[in-house]
Image (cartoon, grey):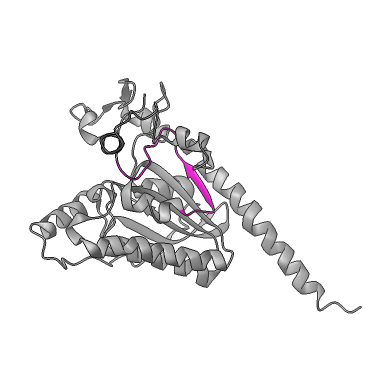
Amino acid sequence: MPTNGKPESKMEIPGGLWLRCDSCGEILYRKTLEQNLFICSRCSYHFRISAKKYIEIVLDPNSFEEYDQNLVAGNPLEFPNYADKFGEAQKKTGYQEGFIYGRGMVNKQPIIFGVMDFAFMGGSMGSVVGEKVARSIRKARFEKIPLIIFATSGGARMQEGIFSLMQMAKTSAELALLAQDQIPYIVIVTNPTMAGVMASYASLGDIIISEPKALLGFAGARVIEGTIGEKLPDGFQTAEFLQKHGFIDVVVPRKFLKQTLSNIIEITWSKNRQAEEKLDASAYEVQ
């Protein structure tokens, strides 16, 4: 049975040499776990990893060029202690915000790449996260290359109130324009992806991929059960359940993500572009 992946459920041995799997309880040697892309060798549970780790796993070495690195949020509602918590998140992760995006390559194929980090205030979507997601979409439209986003989030950033919720509509509208231009958008949802992020750009991909056993949804299971007064099915809101019911296109283990994405880009974009170029060139041939 998959767990909710809460940080407190993980026991870290002094010195950080050993980690306990959140799912099966197996004690794992950290270096071996790193070599296995933070996947449990016993039960295949996928540990949470950082945004930078996804960049290392998915993109070609040294191909990532980050954009808008220093774009940061203010405190529009003057929410108490928000500045302190925001500063702590920056110090903890080394990022200015919870979403990183830029230009990169997947097996030499150019893409716009964005990735969220749950360690930054629970992957919450504030005004700057939404703005950077919107800019990544516009960049893909401008450069006419596919967009790939890795999503993970607990939902909207409550400290920014309506400014956070507005990002759902903004990012969705930008994706509608991307779709009009017929540029592929591939989203990878990871554990967990919930609430406002799941209800906007994380569920609007042309192709939606998930890592195994990821927790996905809008409201939590207990909230839903309390609202409808019924017991939910076993495995409800897991990636495998949602794939079975048609919401997720494919569940892909982390170690196969790069090749899977490369194949999708090749099929949906590169071959089509090559065909269009040949068609355009034939128009100038002397008959």
Horizontal side of 199 relative to 251 (left or right) equals left
Indicate the quadrant containing the C terminus: top left, top right, bottom left or bottom right. Answer: bottom right
Q: Which residues are magenta?
A: 204-219
Vertical placement of 259 versus 234: above or below?
below
Residue nearer the viewer, 88 or 203: 203
Residue 229 position, x and y percent, is 29, 32
Q: Residue at x 54, y 63 (%)?
A: 179
* Residue that lies at the very extreme toward the right in this rendered image: 287
Kindly identify the residue that appears in the image at 35 percent across and 64 percent down: 132
Compared to residue 69, the image places residue 252 above or below, namely above
Q: Residue at x 33, y 57 (%)?
A: 99
Viewer-closest of 81 and 282: 81
Q: Is residue 175 left or right of residue 109?
A: left
Instruction: Residue 62: give x, y in percent of width and height.
Output: 45, 56
* Quarter the N terminus occupies: top left
Please identify the dominant SS of the magenta region. loop
Q: Which image quadrant is residue 9 in?
A: top left
For residue 281, above or below residue 137: below
